[in-house]
Amino acid sequence: MASVSRDFTPVQGPFSPEPRHDAPDAITAVPAPVGPIVHPTPDDAPESIYDGPEPAFPVDFDLPSDEPSWPNFTLAELADQEALAFRAWGNSVGEMFARAMEKLALQIRMTDATTPEEFEARIGVYEDDIRSQWEARGYDAGLEASRDQCRCGVEMYR
């Protein structure tokens, strides 16, 4: 903290970038003497930090390795949770991302996928099937439209 001299000009304190030693009330910092650094060893530790009676049951604070310590969501539920998180942004970008995640969750449920690899494989099969259905519909519609016309463009059977 800077102190004020008799003529009201600030005087630099001990931790200022450039201390002034010419002012009569200036304080300078004296570094503390540094002794040897002592590191604790296992022998310095107390026998026990718990002085009460031993518990009647074994205390094991480690979780079993087969149980996760977080909620275990399915792939579709995880997509739903991400949609909620994006919607919480409260803006149009978050809403767009939330709709995309909801669409992804729907596709995951439609394919009954449990892993991303399963989803990719199954959605590829569904997309190929839908594409072939569209091609068949287009072919049938074109064939039906061409049956009633000859090559010259004149309708033949109406």
Image: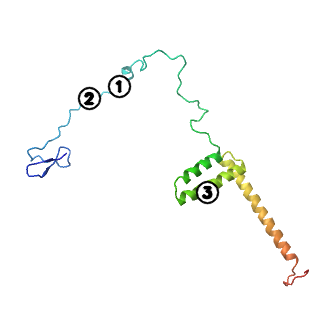
Task: Tell me how far mark 1 sits from mark 2, CA to CA.
Answer: 13 Å
Foreground mark, 3 or 1, reads 3
Foreground mark, 3 or 2, reads 3
- Hey, what amino acid is under mark 2? Pro
Graded by Cα atoms within 10 Å as few (under 14), some (14 to 19) or many (20 or more), the crowding at tag 2 reads few
Identified at 23% across, 32% down, the residue is: 34
Image quarter hosting the N terminus: top left
For the view shown, which residue lies furthest in the right direction?
A: 157
Identified at 65% across, 51% down, the residue is: 105
Graded by Cα atoms within 10 Å as few (under 14), some (14 to 19) or many (20 or more), the crowding at tag 3 reads some
Where is residue 70 drawn, in percent x and y? Answer: 57, 38
- On screen, residue 54 above or below 87: above
Graded by Cα atoms within 10 Å as few (under 14), some (14 to 19) or many (20 or more), the crowding at tag 1 reads few
Q: Secondary structure at mark 2?
A: loop
Instruction: List the residue tagged with mark 3.
Output: 99
Label ID, residue 40 = 1
Foreground mark, 1 or 2, reads 1
Image quarter hosting the C terminus: bottom right
Task: Tell me how far mark 3 sits from mark 2, CA to CA.
Answer: 63 Å
Identified at 42% across, 19% down, the residue is: 48
**Which residue is more in the foreground, 133 or 52?**
52
Where is residue 130 drawn, in percent x and y? Answer: 75, 60
For the view shown, which residue lies furthest in the top direction?
A: 53
Of mark 3 and mark 1, the one earlier in the sequence is: 1
**Left or right, 28 with reference to 135:** left
Task: Tell me how far mark 3 sits from mark 1, CA to CA.
Answer: 57 Å
Label ID, residue 36 = 2
Determine whether label 3 and label 1 are within 8 Å by CB. no
- Hey, what amino acid is under mark 1? Pro
**Left or right, 151 with reference to 95:** right
Where is residue 125 drawn, in percent x and y? Answer: 74, 55
